[in-house]
Amino acid sequence: MAYENKTVDYVYNLLIQSFQEKFNNRLRLLPKSFIVILAKVCAAVFVVPYKLAGWFYLQLFPDTASFDSVNVLGHELRPLVKLGNLFGVGEPTSGQAWEGIVKVTVVREGEPIMLGTQLKSDITGFVYVVSSTVTTEGQTVDVPVYCSESGAVGNLADGDPIKFVSPLGFVEQEAEVDSTTKAGIDDETEAHYRTRVVNRYSNQPQGGALSDYRIWSFDAPGVLQTYPYNGENSPGDVEIYVAGTTDVYPNRVPGRELCVAVGEACTYDPETGAANRRPLTAILDPNNDGTYLNVKPVSIVTVDVAVTGVTGVDPSDFGREFKSVVETYLLGREPYIRGLSDDNNRTNYVQTNALIALANSVATGLKAQFGTVEISINEETVANYTLDKGELCDLGSLYVNGVEYEE
C-alpha cells in the first residue's frame, strides 16, 4: 500500500459513512449529531499520528530532512544537521566578518592608533574596528580593521571611503580601503548545507579519490564548487580549481584566501586539526609553506551571443526573455572530469544548436520568429566550445538584430 497524505476531512467522511451505516441503518440508537461529533474527534485523533509518522519518515533522508529546530521529548535538534554530523559533515558553517587594511593619512607622526578604535562606512552603514595598535609613521599608515558584523553585507571594495567615528587629530578623519584580507561570508544557507550533506551521503570518502577533494573542499566557507584533477608536473600532484559563491564572488572567481582555505580543508580536519585527509604522497602545497599553489581559482570564458532576423516582436522583449535562459544555460556549463561528471549528461560543451533550441522556445512563447544564432569567444565566431581544465563560462554581450541588448 502506498503512503498517501490523508486529510482530516477524508478520514471524517470515511468514519461518518461507516458509523451511519452501522448504527443508523441497523440499530438507529444514536442521534445524527452525536455521530457527526464523534467522527470529527476520531478523524483528528487518527490523522495526527498518521502525519507524524510521515514527517518522521522524511527525516531519515538528507534531501527531505528538516533544517529547522524541533523539540522531541525535551531534546532540541535539527534533523538535517543531526544527519550532517552523523555523516561527518559537521555543523553548518558560520559567517565571517570582513577584514582588511585601511590606508590612513598621517597629520602628526609618533601617535598610536589604538586597538579598538572605530571607523564607519557610509556605504555599508557598519562600524569597523581596528584590530591591532599601529603607530603613525610617514605620510600614510596601513591599519588593519574588521567589520563588527559578520556576513557579505559588510564587504568593502578597494578604494572605498571610511571615516573615524571620533576624530583623532593626528590623522585625517577620512581614510580609504587599501585591500581585503578576508572577505565577509554569510552564514551557510540551508540549500548549500543540504547539498553538502547529500554529497557526503552519496559519496563516502575513499581515502584520496577525486570525489574526496570535492567533499573536503566544502568545509571551507564560500565554496560553490571545486574541480580536482591529477597534476601534470609529477605523479603526486593534485590540482584543484575553486569556484566561489556568487554572494561573495559575483563572477565566481575567488581570491587566494579561499584557495588557501580549500587547501587547508583538504589537508586538515577542521574539527580536530588532524592531518587525516589527503594521502601523504599527494601534493597540494608544492612549496610546503601554506600557500597551496596547486589550489587555483577557476577562469571564466566570456561568450558573446548574437541573434539575427527577429521579427513579430519588439527586439528588446525578445532580448529580455532570451538573455535569462542563455545565462541559466551558460551558468550550468562546467568542465568534464571522468569519475565526477555524469557521463550521460555532459555539460562541458557550449553549443550553438543548444542556443538555437533556446531561442526557438523563446520565439514560440512570444509568437515571434528569428533567423540565426551565433556565438563568439574572444571575437572569434565558433560553432561549439569545449570547456578546458578549471574553466567556467558566462554571458558577455547579447546582440539582437545587430544591436547590443542592455537592460
Image (spheres, helix red, strand yellow):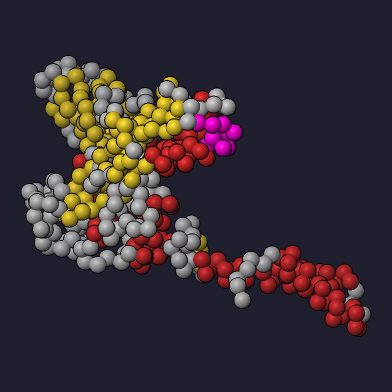
Q: Nearer the viewer, residue 262 or 207?
A: 207
| Figure check: 178 above or below 264 | above
Horizontally, is 24 left or right of 315 in the view? right
Q: Quadrant of the N terminus?
A: bottom right
Q: Which residues are magenta?
A: 362-370
Residue 224: horizontal and vertical position, in percent?
33, 47
> Given the current orientation, which residue lies at the most extreme right position?
28
For image coordinates 37% across by 28% down, the residue present is: 397
Within the image, what quadrant is residue 328 found in? top left
The reply, left or right, for residue 18 in relation to residue 176 is right
Looking at the image, which residue is at 19% across and 48% down?
A: 295
- Give the x, y percent position of residue 289: 9, 48
Estimate the x, y position of residue 55 in percent, counting from the top left: 55, 66
Q: Is residue 60 above or below residue 66?
A: below
- Residue 15 visible? The answer is yes
Report the number of discs.
0
Residue lying farthest to the top in this orientation: 107
- Residue 363 lies within the magenta run: yes
In which quadrant of the rendered view does residue 216 lie?
bottom left
Magenta span contains residue 273: no
Nearer to me, 123 or 397: 397
Q: Is residue 91 above or below residue 106?
A: below
Question: Is residue 222 something that shows in the picture?
Answer: no
For the point 37% across and 24% down, which residue is it?
122
User: Splitting the image into 4 quarters, where does residue 366 fall?
Assistant: top right
Q: Residue at x 68, y 72 (%)?
A: 46
User: Which of 258/236 is in front?
Assistant: 236
